Amino acid sequence: MPDMSASASQAMTHLVTLAEVDENKVTPGVLGFIVFAVMAVAVWFLMKSMNRHMGKVDFTESAETEPEGGPVSGRAKPQQG
């Protein structure tokens, strides 16, 4: 099996250079805040709309009428001919 310690240490040194970030340069800024705020307002409006639509749904089942006084079934009656 090949020795992986050299490539692992090389990868770690490469990742360490990526981890050193100047915190003054990396910020979400005003644009990030605006995008987040717009998304939050959109989710709020979607939740209000969903609540309004769910309020209109009638969850009670109505009694099915039996045609010709027979029992209600999902199958069609066979025709005699």
Image (cartoon, rainbow, N blue to C red):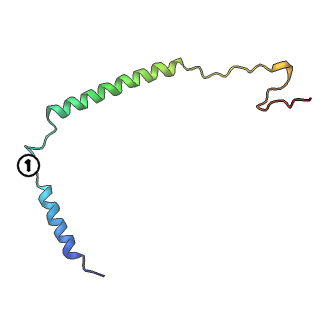
Q: Which residue is mark 1?
A: 22
Local SS, label 1 = loop
18 sits left or right of 55 in the view: left
* 42 versus 9 height, above or below: above
Q: Nearer the viewer, residue 73 or 29?
A: 73
Q: From the top left corner, tell me how far across and down residue 37 is, in percent.
A: 25, 28
Pointer 1 local density, CA inside 10 Å: few below 14, some 14–19, many at least 20: few
Q: How many numbered tags mark residues here?
A: 1
44 sits left or right of 74 in the view: left
44 sits left or right of 30 in the view: right
Q: From the top left corner, tell me how far across and down residue 13 is, in percent.
A: 14, 66
Q: Which residue is found at the position 16% from the left and 69% from the top? A: 10
* 7 versus 29 height, above or below: below
Q: Which residue is found at the position 14% from the left and 31% from the top? A: 30
For this orientation, the residue located farthest to the right is 81
Q: Residue 12 appears in which quarter of the rendering?
A: bottom left
* 58 versus 9 height, above or below: above
62 sits left or right of 36 in the view: right
* 38 versus 68 height, above or below: below
Indicate the amino acid at tag 1.
Answer: Asp
Q: Residue 48 appears in which quarter of the rendering?
A: top left
Q: From the top left corner, tell me how far across and down residue 81 is, in percent.
A: 92, 29
Quadrant of the image containing the N terminus: bottom left
For this orientation, the residue located farthest to the front is 81
Q: Nearer the viewer, residue 8 or 74?
A: 74
Q: Which residue is found at the position 79% from the left and 30% from the top? A: 73
Q: Which residue is found at the position 12% from the left and 44% from the top? A: 26
Q: From the top left corner, tell me how far across and down residue 54 is, in percent.
A: 50, 22
